[in-house]
Image (cartoon, rainbow, N blue to C red):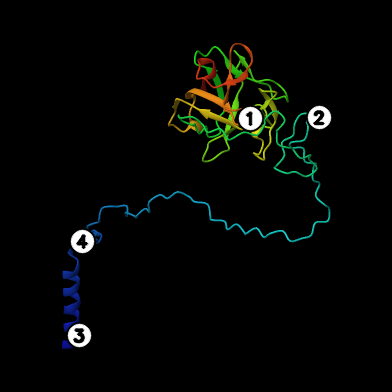
Amino acid sequence: MSSSMTFFLFALCFTAATASPLAARGYPPITPPSVTPSVPVPPSYTPTVPVPPATTSCPPTVTVPPVTPCTKDCTTPPVVPPCTKNCPPTSPPVVDPPCTKNCPTVPPCTKDCPPKDPVVPQGGCHPNFAGAALTLSTASGALSWSAKPVVGNPLSASSSPSKFFFQQTGFPVVSYTVKTVEDVNFALEVKGGAPVIGNNDPSGSNQCQKWFVDCSSCSSADVSQTKGKVASGCRISSGETNKQCVTAKGPGPMTLAACDGSGDQLFDFTAV
């Protein structure tokens, strides 16, 4: 046997003897257990997401187109009702905008009011009633002004008060037009030497419908926002009867008499 063959057999035997002694004895080969390297796992977490603050839902702004003026010619003439303001009432009065078309002219009341020098109000206060509805009564409260909105109805002293508007019409001398609240087409005027209800003259030229109010006490509050007594100790005189005052001698029609400051010529105003 050659030396190279001898060396090959020797190497083969040495490898078999050293490779697996147990395998040479009939045992199965040993497989080393698999080892999983220990890798640290980060704890689970929920990412923080910034939440925008809540806002109120707003509707979108809608642009309103401008309204263009009407320029188209009318094809049908407008129907204009006849003016009835200041016309003699033949049915329930109709309140129209100020107009004079088709209405008879209302002449100033002069028959019962001879021209005289203007009456200058006496000392005291002259209330601004600011459009408030008012009742008038004697100091005791037993008698009040009462009248129905009917032409010729007398102003009466009664336990059942009516409501009136005292509208300022004069300056610097303060005068008033006295209208019934129930129907402002009627106003207090002098006729036959007595205070009665007549058709309101909006021109302001009817001297028989001009009245002066002089009070011993007037409220400084805004009368339009006030309820209750707003003026006291007031005398009401006509502008065309030589300083004659409305007088309440007792229940019934009131009269005009020379102003003497007596209690039956003094009235309190109450805003209602």
Q: Dot 1 lies on which element?
A: strand
Give left or right: position of 111 versus 213.
right
Q: Dot 2 lies on which element?
A: loop
- Closer to the N terminus: mark 2 or mark 3? 3
Q: Nearer the viewer, mark 1 or mark 3?
A: 1
- Closer to the N terminus: mark 1 or mark 4? 4
Q: Residue at x 62, y 31 (%)?
A: 240
Q: CA distance from mark 2 to mark 3?
A: 158 Å
**Residue 86 image point, x, y percent:** 74, 36
Q: Are marks 1 and 3 in contact (CB under 8 Å)?
A: no
Residue corresponding to mark 3: 5
**Is 183 rendered above or below residue 11?**
above
Q: CA distance from mark 4 to mark 3?
A: 27 Å
Residue corresponding to mark 2: 90
Q: Can residue 272 be seen by looking at this rendering?
A: no
- Closer to the N terminus: mark 1 or mark 3? 3
| Amino acid type, mark 2 | Thr
- Closer to the N terminus: mark 2 or mark 4? 4
Residue 187, quarter of the rendered image? top right
Q: Residue at x 52, y 37 (%)?
A: 173
| Amino acid type, mark 1 | Lys
Q: CA distance from mark 1 to mark 4?
A: 140 Å
**Residue 194 image point, x, y percent:** 66, 22
Residue 198, quarter of the rendered image? top right
Residue corresponding to mark 1: 179
Q: Residue at x 54, y 19 (%)?
A: 265
Q: Dot 3 lies on which element?
A: helix
Viewer-closest of 154 and 149: 154
Give left or right: position of 189 versus 125.
right
Indicate which disc residue 25 carries: 4
Q: Dot 4 lies on which element?
A: loop
